[in-house]
Amino acid sequence: MHAPVLVLKDSLKRESGSKVQHANIQASKAVADIIRTTLGPRSMLKMLLDGGGNIVVTNDGNAILRELDLAHPAAKSMIELSRTQDEEVGDGTTSVIVLAGEMLHVAEAFLDKSYHPTVICRAYNKALEDAIAVLDKIAMPIDVNDRATMLSLVKSCIGTKFTSQFGDLIADLAIDATTTVGVDLGQGLREVDIKKYIKVEKIPGGQLEDSKVLKGVMFNKDVVAPGKMRRKIVNPRIILLDCPLEYKKGENQTNAELVREEDWEVLLRMEEEYIKNLCDQIVMFKPDLVITEKGLSDLACHYLCKHGVSAIRRLRKTDNNRIAKASGAVIVNRPDELQESDVGTGAGLFEVKKIGDEFFAFIVDCKEPKACTVLLRGASKEFLSEVDRNLQDAMSVARNIIKNPKLLPGGGATELTVSAALKQKSSSIEGIEKWPYEAAAMAFEAIPRTLAQNCGVNVIRTMTALQGKHANCENAWIGIDGNTGVITDMKERKIWDAYNVKAQTFKTAIEAASMLLRIDDIVSGIKKKQAPGAGAPSKPTVETEADADSEQILPD
């Protein structure tokens, strides 16, 4: 009889085989169940308290999962899903998780019958290809410049969010902002950079109705010398700098020894003249407003005041870029390189206003702004941050449409159509893959089913009726109206989804499910390797009285 061989250390824990797959599926289903109630217009909100005692109240799938701290590795990778979805397309974060959870749930039956995971994955990938093909078939192209269609689309995408009660307001803001910032790349492509050129400024106070998209930018700064400089300038000439308007200090420390007193005066005068030269170079272009990212000394401020130029200092780089985009100015690094073409004349009005108890500078009424600020007002901080999250989603949806102007029906209609088409196709698939393929088709029904659950209607009846309507594939647009739970035509109700949100949802969910199914071994408790030579940290030695005597006393 041979002695047992220990391969892994005692501290490591290893689980393998079907046990791991079942654990992974359970974990993923648990994550999906957390979020399931936040799908659709009748969704519940989740309230999360984080360690700092801050409250987050939201029903945005990604925002909820971001706050959760999970122990199980499979659950963690589910959270990554919703994050990628949020970064890629900005919407559909909840559907991804629900769909992936369902895909894993239906796979469980096959694992019990000892199917091999790769067979299931193969069937899933085939189902994914066919699903995308169905999407292409039922997608409907739209005209991006038709505002009414865009509005109804963005509205149906935010209909599931908390701010849907404010009607078209958020949708309006989102469309305004994204159409402002869109840049034509040629060949009919438009690129919208939300992160760089759309700034959302949240100011508590006022009502949500006061929110607006500015035709320009605003930032939280006042002019340097409020009493002396103009605070309202019509058609300002704007110069943007990213260098300090103060005396240059040397890069490295230098000591100058002066013998005569006059030399000291010469030094001071040199500093003053240096600043005066800087200001003169700027004033030559007759600007009305000088904005710098760095400091601006009192002396420079004095010279600029004398020439009636308003100045703003220490502006963020990102804000400066936005002003450049909005007013047509070019950010200049050194005043002596200024040219007439660098002066921004695109803005119609510069004004400093007091909102609440802070001063905000507005550069608005721009002719062709390529950057903008969305000004959000509202009652409380939590409320504003939720509106901000919804606005980000709305803007991403608008961006997706501008990038890829195709629509799909919302309200679970797309999923049902895909499901029906896949069920029909499954009969022509030969071999062992047929059953997982059919199961994947069934899994797509998770979305309409969850919608029905959240409306509080009879789920089984509704689902049977819907499947009946979709079974012969004639009307792809029949779905659930998420508010009432009635089965209607999505075209009439104007409930749409963006094509690339849906496509991305399907891809992410199925790929993730395949990945989690393929895991058959979890080894945990692996210690991080220490750098060689860095032995165990030595314990601090505590001197006792006995040691103190034995030390040699050093001679003075």
Image (cartoon, helix red, strand yellow):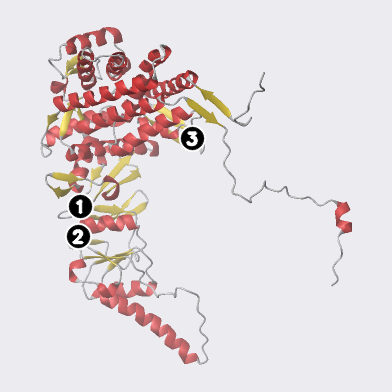
Quadrant that contains the N terminus:
top right
Say what secondary structure mark 2 lies in.
loop
Q: Which mark is residue 328?
A: 2
- Measuring from the top left, give residue 316's x and y in whole percent: 35, 57
Residue to which mark 1 is pinned: 370
Residue to which mark 3 is pinned: 50
Q: CA distance from mark 3 to mark 1?
A: 37 Å
Kind of residue indicated by mark 2: Gly
Task: Note whether residue 229 is visible.
Answer: yes
Furthest-front residue in this view = 1
Quadrant that contains the C terminus:
bottom right
**Position of residue 455 in the picture relative to residue 151 (left or right):** right
- Measuring from the top left, give residue 78's x and y in whole percent: 40, 29
Of label 1 and label 2, which has the lower sequence position? 2
| Circle 3/circle 2 CB separation < 8 Å | no
Kind of residue indicated by mark 1: Lys
162 shown above or below 22: below
Q: Residues within 10 Å of mark 3 (few under 14, many from 20)?
A: few
313 shown above or below 266: above
Q: CA distance from mark 3 to mark 2?
A: 43 Å
Of label 3 and label 2, which has the lower sequence position? 3
Kind of residue indicated by mark 3: Asp
